[in-house]
Amino acid sequence: MRQLGWLASACVLFAAVVAVDGWPALRELDSSREWRAIDAAPNGASLEGLQVAVETQVAAIAAQRPERAAVLIRLSMEVTPAAREAWKDCRVSLHDTAGKVWMPLTSANSDGAIKALSPDRKSFGPCRLYSTDERENKETILADQLFLLPADSLQTLRLHVSGVGTRPRALSFAIAPAVRQLP
């Protein structure tokens, strides 16, 4: 009977140590995931003072690799100092209905692909919320994100935009990119 008491005490102590040690890790996991996506219209939505709109959405499929699509998403964001402080960063991802997630490409070659796919042949860089002018109270920032994903998933995409200060909430835009066939 005495051994059963020691075993029960050890189990209670083990559970307490796991709870105390594991709680910060669980909170960090919860804050880095986008559990609560808020539906947003492509023409714009606001979260924590940041106004975000999808300006361009284009997919390109090359004849050599018809199973793959390069998707360009251009965001327009109206940023205020309060929104910059609340968001802290900007994370963009594509999601499909099956739960697959794609993050943007960040290689040296992605800048050239963005310029080739964008209507104005410019690349505004990835989604960043740092200020370009310290004196300005409100500014509009453009951001280009390039994704590589299976061509058959283009019909069921949602774009999530979130920041450290907004997670687990994120803006979720329905995306239906115009498809261009490349030779």
Image (spheres, grey):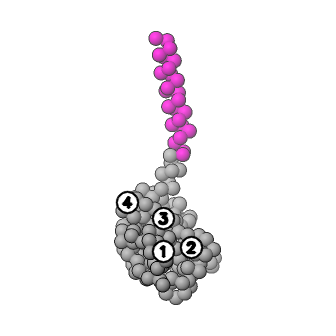
Residue where numbered disc 1 is placed: 65
Q: CA distance from mark 4 to mark 1?
A: 23 Å
Task: Give whichever of 9, 113 is nearer the camera.
Answer: 113
In front of the other: label 4 or label 1? 1
User: Residue tagged by mark 2?
Assistant: 126
Location of mark 4 (residue): 98
* Residue lying furthest top: 1
Residue drawn at x 40%, y 62% as measured from the top left: 37
State the image quarter where residue 132 is shown: bottom right
Label 3 sits on residue: 102
Comes first in the chain, label 1 or label 3:
1
Q: In terms of secondary structure, where does tag 1 sit?
A: loop
Tell me the CA gap for discs 3 and 4: 12 Å
Q: Position of residue 169 (x, y in %)?
A: 43, 60
Which residue sits at x=50%, y=20%? 7
Q: Earlier in the sequence, mark 4 or mark 1?
A: 1
Q: Is 5 one of the magenta-colored residues? A: yes
Residue 139 makes an appearance in the image: no
> CA separation, marks 4 and 2?
26 Å
SS for dot 2? loop
Q: Secondary structure at mark 3?
A: strand
Q: Which residues are magenta?
A: 1-25
The amino acid marked with disc number 1 is: Arg
The numbered mark, 4 or 2, whose residue comes first in the sequence reads: 4
Across and down, in percent, residue 110 comes to: 58, 75
Please tell me how crowded label 4 is: few (under 14), some (14-19), or many (20+) other residues with Cα within 10 Å. few
